[in-house]
Amino acid sequence: MEKPGVLLIGCFLLQGALSLVFYGIPSILFSALVPPGVGENLPWALRVLVLGYFGLGIASIYGISLGGDLSAGKVLGMAYFAVGAVGSIAVLLESRDSYENPLLLVVFSAWLAVSLTGFLIVGTLKNPLPFKTASMVSMLLLGASAAVSVLNAEWVVLDLVELLGSLEALPIQGAG
C-alpha cells in the first residue's frame, strides 16, 4: 500500500510543481479542450476551468488522505487525472507538427504520463493514504498552482491572440 500511495502523492506534487514552473499548462490544456463556440469568452472561462480543475485535485487529496470520503476522493481524483490526460493528448495532437516550442511537447508528455499514472493508482486505492503531511503539502502546492495559473490565464490566451491576431484564429479551438 505504501509504494502506490507515495507514488500517488508524488503525482499530485509533481503536477503542482510543474504547474508553478510552467504556469501556462492549465490554460493551454483547457484551450485545447474548450469547444470552438466559446470564442471571446475563453479568457473568462479559463479561470473557472483552472480553479475547478485544481479544486478536483485538492478535494481528491482530502478525500483519499485527510479524513474525507475515500470513494468520493477516488472519483474526484480519477476525474482530475482523466482531464489532465485528455487535455494533454489534445495538446500533443494539435502541436505534433509544430517544432516552434519543443519544450511544450516535453512538458505535456510528462503531464500525460503523470496523469495516467495517477489515474491508475487512485482507481485501485483500497484504504485512505496515511501521509497526512505530504497530503497537506500537495494540497497547498495545488492551491498555489491554481492561484498562479488563474492570475495568468487571461495573459496566456491574450498572448496567443496577439500572436495569431484573433481568438477565432486559435488553432487550439478547432477554428481556422
Image (cartoon, rainbow, N blue to C red):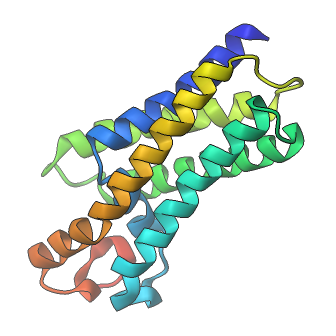
Q: Identify the image quadrant of residue 147.
A: bottom left
Find residue 143 and report its horizontal and vertical position in percent: 48, 46
Find residue 127 and report its horizontal and vertical position in percent: 87, 23
Residue 132 visible in rendering: yes
From the image, which quarter does the N terminus lie in?
top right
Residue 112 visible in rendering: no
Q: How many marks?
A: 0
Query: In this image, 37 relative to 70: left or right?
Result: left
* Residue placed most toward the observer, 125 or 63: 63
Look at the picture and state if 71 lies above or below 95.
above
Q: Identify the image quadrant of residue 166.
A: bottom left
Find residue 43 and report its horizontal and vertical position in percent: 34, 78
From the image, which quarter does the C terminus lie in?
bottom left
Residue at point 34% right, 84% down? 175
Look at the picture and state if 78 lies above or below 94.
above
Residue at point 15% right, 70% down? 159
Residue at point 26% right, 85% down? 167
Residue at point 49% right, 29% down? 13
Query: In this image, 20 relative to 74: left or right?
Result: left
Query: In this image, 98 relative to 124: left or right?
Result: left
